[in-house]
DNA sequence: TCTGATTTGTAGCCGTGGCTACAATTAAGC
DNA sequence: GCTTAATTGTAGCCACGGCTACAAATCAGA
């Protein structure tokens, strides 16, 4: 921000330059991407604990279609972020924060799939696309979805 | 999926193990992410050429909210992928393939925004979320959107 | 024209999220 | 109980997409 009390206020309109909006939108999309992986892991770990009683790195890796080494690295990141815990050679668990995230993600996922189906997307396509879409759906949009589905 | 020739119909659809589906879905989302950046650049370059007459790295960078160095690196990737061309210290242009991609992306973007608005998402939120969502919308889902909007 | 600002490009760093290869630990079977 | 298989973890590689700092080229104005 060049602080000069110049005569010509130039292309600086009351608010923001028009391209700043766009830049901001792209930035949003980028940061959403950064948290997408954490969200997927949290949800999956929660699912595995619920259905299998435990979440083991190998299972996580198989479910996500990545190598176990990759899964372990990502789990380490979850731990750094305070979403999960694990002891050497033992399974993975979610912290309260991780559980909360998992619940939110799961609810959002369902809502997205349901909305897609409601507007005519075939079930299978809805499931596949939702996996990528869900991470970019804001709270506001989510509320609109719920309302549209009559779950206001 | 009608397929019940076995005794234990259970959760085994005779095709793939259940977790393979899920892995496949995640993989889809990952590859979509990889092409997202290319799509954004292609569309933006096309826009700039249309409105400004040329697409310069600095403008691209400002519009995307990244440093010019980052933009130039990404443009290099576009060139590697055969989507754009440029000569030293001259602007960036799209190849026919790049133009085609830009057109597809632009149409898809509009359709996604329109659908979001149609189900009740406020315009501004629709614009923001669409930026991230669009890259994960399959052809099939896109067709469903068009049909829902009465543009079958 | 030539000098300084702007634009463009290059170099090199970082974190992420893939991978393979290998080491360590745990679990299973004889 | 020991040996072997499976699982878990570590190390090190790669490409990507951010960044800053610096160099080179172009453009504009005096």
Image (cartoon, coloured by chain):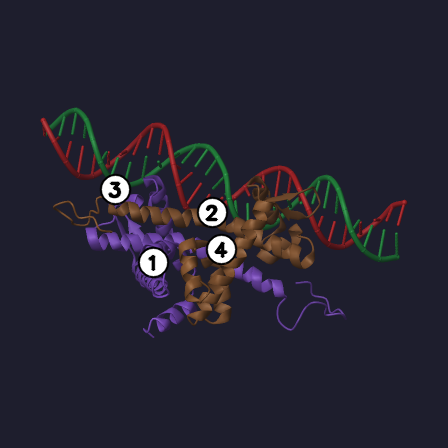
Chain colours: A purple, B brown, C red, D green
Q: Is residue A53 visible?
A: no
> Are both tags, 3 and 4, on one chain?
yes
Front of the two marks 2 and 3 = 2
Pick the residue in front: B25 or A81: B25
CA neighbours of label 3 inside 10 A, class few (<14), some (14 to 19), many (20+): few
Residue B34 tag number: 2
Separation of marks 4 and 1 at Cα, in angstroms: 28 Å
Quadrant position of residue B143 = bottom left
Residue that appears at 31% across and 62% down: A110
Task: Give the chain of mark 1.
Answer: A
Which x, y percent locates residue A19? 61, 62
Find the distance from the CA under tag 1 to the CA under tag 3: 41 Å
Label 4 or label 1, whichever lies nearer to me, is 1
Q: Verify CB contact (< 8 Å) between mark 2 and mark 3.
A: no
- Label 3 chain ID: A
Secondary structure category for the residue under label 3: loop
Q: Residue at x 59, y 42 (%)?
A: B79
In this rendering, do the residues under marks 2 and 1 share a single chain? no
Residue topped by disc 1: A122
Residue A39 point in image, percent of width and height:
36, 56
Q: Would you name the residue on which mark 3 appears?
A: A89
Q: First in sequence, mark 3 or 4: give its number.
A: 4
Query: Could you tell me residue A45's position as x and y percent?
Result: 28, 52
Residue extending furthest front? B152
């Amino acid at each position: 921000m060049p602080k000069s009390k110049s005569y010509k206020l130039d292309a600086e309109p009351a608010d923001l330059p028009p391209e700043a909006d766009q830049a901001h939108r792209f930035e949003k999309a980028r940061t959403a991407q950064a948290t997408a992986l954490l969200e997927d892991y949290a949800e999956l770990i929660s699912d595995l604990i619920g259905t299998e009683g435990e979440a083991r790195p190998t299972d996580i890796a198989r479910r996500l279609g990545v190598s176990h080494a990759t899964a372990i690295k990502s789990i380490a990141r979850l731990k750094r972020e305070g979403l999960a815990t694990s002891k050497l050679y033992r399974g993975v668990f979610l912290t309260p924060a991780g559980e909360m995230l998992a619940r939110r993600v799961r609810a959002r996922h369902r809502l997205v799939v349901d909305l897609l189906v409601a507007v005519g997307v075939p079930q299978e396509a809805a499931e596949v696309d939702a996996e990528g879409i869900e991470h970019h759906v804001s709270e506001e949009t989510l509320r609109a979805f719920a309302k549209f589905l009559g779950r206001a």
